[in-house]
Amino acid sequence: MSMQFQFEQPPEGEDKPAFLSKPGFYHVAVLAQNPQPIGKNQQYIDGLEVQFGVLAGTHLDQFDTSYTCIFIKGNANHSDGGRFCNLKLLKLFTALGLLGEHAPGQQTTLDTSLLVGRQCVIEVESKKNSEGSKNPDGFHIEFKGAQVFHVDDPAVKDVPKHPEFLGIIPKELRRAATTFKNDNPPPAAGAAAATPSAPDQPKPRLSVAQMLGAGAGAGSVHAPAADTSDV
């Protein structure tokens, strides 16, 4: 008796890593965000979960992989009083154009749903797994310090970037190289109108293909040749 089995074939004919697995600098886009992440113990974490999609970077074979990180809010119980965690959040929001001029000590409310689709450059490193993990002899990828940069920051001008994706960044989110020489970047686009997002309704996830428009199929978006121009 004939029995039929139906399945959808993947875009690639060979096995392709789904998650970022090599250290380096990467041009990324925010695919999803969650202002109320839940930890392994099913408890809420006081921070912001961000999923990045890799567009280009140190290793071309990492294109279209993803990397998820939770940016913890700093608090007084941390050894440094929360300074480093809050610095990491500050750099993230500034690099993605959601926060403009730095206002030391000011309580700030932002609509983190606006992060989805925005682009930046991050640096990640390889760290050995802890002794109590399922694979204590293995390694994992994690953020290197607070290494988050605006795509136009001269500090990352030599990091390969995907020219097609750079081309869809709204003009108001781009910056001249000279604006990075001081601590007062221009006001962030749309920051004044920002309102808190509903914590249980994060913006729908994007795919790397969808970022180039509704008509861009997965097969039409390809890893670029290294672009090291000063954008």
Image (spheres, helix red, strand yellow):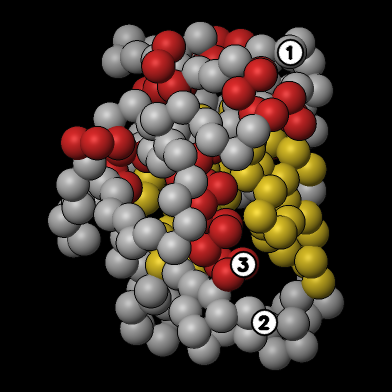
Q: Residues within 10 Å of mark 2 (few under 14, many from 20)?
A: few
Q: Amino acid at mark 3?
A: Phe
Identify residue for label 2: 134
Mark sitting earlier along the chain (1/3) = 3
Judged from the image, the secondary structure of the residue bearing numbered disc 1 is loop
Mark sitting earlier along the chain (2/3) = 3
Q: Is residue 89 above or below residue 188?
A: below
Coordinates of residue 163 in the picture (x, y in percent): 61, 11
Coordinates of residue 10 in the picture (x, y in percent): 49, 31
Residue at point 45%, 39% (across, down): 101
Judged from the image, the secondary structure of the residue bearing numbered disc 2 is loop
Observer-side mark, 1 or 3, equals 3
Coordinates of residue 130 in the picture (x, y in percent): 74, 82
Observer-side mark, 2 or 3, equals 3
Identify residue for label 1: 230
124 or 152: which is nearer to us?
152
Q: Can residue 203 be seen in this snapshot?
A: no
Coordinates of residue 35 in the picture (x, y in percent): 32, 60
Residue at point 73%, 25% (across, down): 154
Residue at point 39%, 31% (across, down): 188
Residue 205: which quarter of the image?
top left
Q: Residues within 10 Å of mark 1 (few under 14, many from 20)?
A: some
Q: Of the numbered discs in the image, which one, if any, rests on residue 84?
A: 3
Q: Amino acid at mark 1?
A: Asp
38 or 190: which is nearer to us?
190
Q: Is residue 39 above or below residue 98?
A: below
Q: Amino acid at mark 2?
A: Lys
Q: Is residue 122 above or below residue 63?
A: below
Left/right placement of residue 120 relative to residue 171 reads: right
